[in-house]
Image: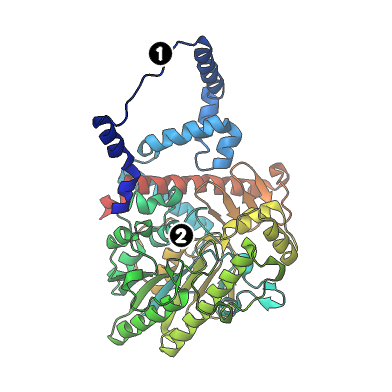
Amino acid sequence: MHIRQILYFIDFPIIIGLLISKKVKVIKHKEFKFKPVLVMAIVVGILCSYYHFIPESLELVTGYIYNKKNSVRYGTIYGYHFVDVRNAITHNNNTVYKTYDEMMDVYDDFKETQNELNPENTTYQGSGANKNVIILQLESVQNFTIGATINGKEITPNLNKFLNENINVTNMHATSYTTTADSEHSVITSTYPQENGEAFSKYYGNTYDDIFGNFKNAGYYTMYAHGNHGYFWNRQNVFSKYEVDDITFLDDFEDQSELIRTYLSDELLYKQTIAHMKETVDSGETVFYDLVAASSHKPFELAGIIDKYSKVSIDVGDLAGTELGNYLEAVNYADYAFGIFIDELKEAGLYDNTVIVVFGDHYGMQMYDENLIEFLGYNRNNYNDVRMQYEFSNVVCGIRIPGVSNVVIDEPVSKMDVKPTLAQICNIEDTFSLGTSIFNRNSYVAINNGKVITKDYYYDGDSWYILETGEKLDINSIPEEEKKRLDLYVEEALIEIEISNSVVVNNLLQDSK
């Protein structure tokens, strides 16, 4: 709470004071009269609502609580709001697993099935052991910007170079359609986020088998840095629960000379955290750093950048002033700053001994922006509506392991796979992750609303579609073995979402500590 928030309620004492002083009076204007028409309208309204709430419909809507689109499709707007309100009131009761032991029984079976679907690839096991590790989360950088050009210039030249030289993960998907905080939650805990940042705002006191604890137990110095205030998305409270040696927010940075709106510019974030990293490494520590960049945050205006067009290298032409034009400029600036990030690491002598995982947190552009549709149609040979939904969750991702180069991974992966991937690379213990190593993944990923993505198909919560053409898949026309596999993906996706929701809402992992 802030003092200024008293203004929200200031009218109450003013009105009470006026009434007590008799400066104003409350006068009954007229007697209320019973109106049969009003009662009839209420009764008809209830009956109409009940028509939509026959038990079968209500059960069906409840089955789609993770998918808002289908909640409305099958339950109408009445059913959607009824189930939504009921879930808000009885959220804990709606989780499937109430105890750690019953959850773990299902988790063990789930992991066994995942191991069958995603055979272990030990090629990179321990390849980054005893090396420094940096996780870098880029605000709103979607994968469609990678390799794309506008008016003859690359939008992301530095990211393109990094991805071409290292491990390019082309099929990384966000685990929700919501916030930066939700992306952080999935990366740190390898569980799905709740809606709209609730994991950070409502369940921040939870215990997890988190990535900071994993690296701290392995002897690493741990740091988290974000160029915003600690109260934003409750991060101060969230990260104080983890084993983080150094938590750095905006007020902790010495140089705040360049702010984009209320965020420290990416350039200043990188320069100062890498200087800190060099000091820490020079003192004999092996480090794990989690950096969150924010300069390409909506509304993508880059307000506050000093000498903006010396840092934005593209000309968006006719898109100038549009949301897409602003977005592409913001991503281009984020790429400029990423180039500085790499240069600073090299200049500090850290690059050759550091594992880097860089990824976008979530979508930047709204799906059906007309300029975006035209832009994607120009840059993609096979654009369709299903592809647009795919693009919406597909974010940039690349991995650097010193000594490994020119690798492309195009199997579907998600944010929940970052933690087990780093555990494999660095040979550290990982006792609870719903994700699996990126190097093992070859089947499907899910979003927390029940949508499922494979390399070739997209499941919208109701039907499967062919990604290449956007056509609805005739499930009966494919081989029985493939049909069973797709059914299994949907079944397993719902199981892992149920496990995750139970873990987060009921704080089940506290019983494992």
Image-quadrant location for residue 300 = bottom right
| Residue at 60% from the left image edge and 71% from the top image edge | 329
Q: Which residue is mark 2?
A: 180
- Badge 1 or badge 2: first in the primary sequence: 1
Give the image's coloring scheme: rainbow
Label 1 secondary element: loop
In the foreground, 150 or 468: 150
User: Which residue ends up furthest to the front in the rendered image?
Assistant: 23
Label 2, secondary structure: give it. helix
| Up-down relation of residue 508 to residue 232 (above or below) | above
> Where's residue 412, x and y in %?
57, 60
Residue found at x 46% / y 59%: 180
Question: Are the residues at dot 1 and dot 2 in contact (C-beta closer than 8 Å)?
Answer: no
**119 vs 308: above or below:** above
Is any atom of residue 357 visible in this view?
A: yes
Q: Which mark is residue 31?
A: 1
Q: CA distance from mark 1 to mark 2?
A: 54 Å
Question: Can residue 127 be seen?
Answer: no
What percent of the width, then of the height, locates residue 386? Answer: 67, 52
Three-letter amino acid code of the residue under disc 2: Thr
Asked whether 88 or 16 is in front, the reply is 16
At 40% across and 88% down in the image, what residue appears? 348
Tag nearer the camera, 1 or 2: 1
Quadrant for residue 68, please give it.
Answer: top right
Task: Assess disc 2: are there few (<14), some (14-19) or many (≥20) residues with their C-alpha within 10 Å of its C-alpha.
Answer: many
Q: Is residue 252 or residue 25 the one in the foreground?
A: 25
- Whether residue 431 is situated above or below residue 465 in the rendered picture: below
Give x and y (percent) for residue 252: 31, 72
Q: Residue 245, image x and y in percent?
A: 27, 71
Left or right of 502, for residue 285? left
Decide if residue 475 is on the left or right side of residue 485.
right
The answer to which of 88 and 349 lies nearer the viewer is 88
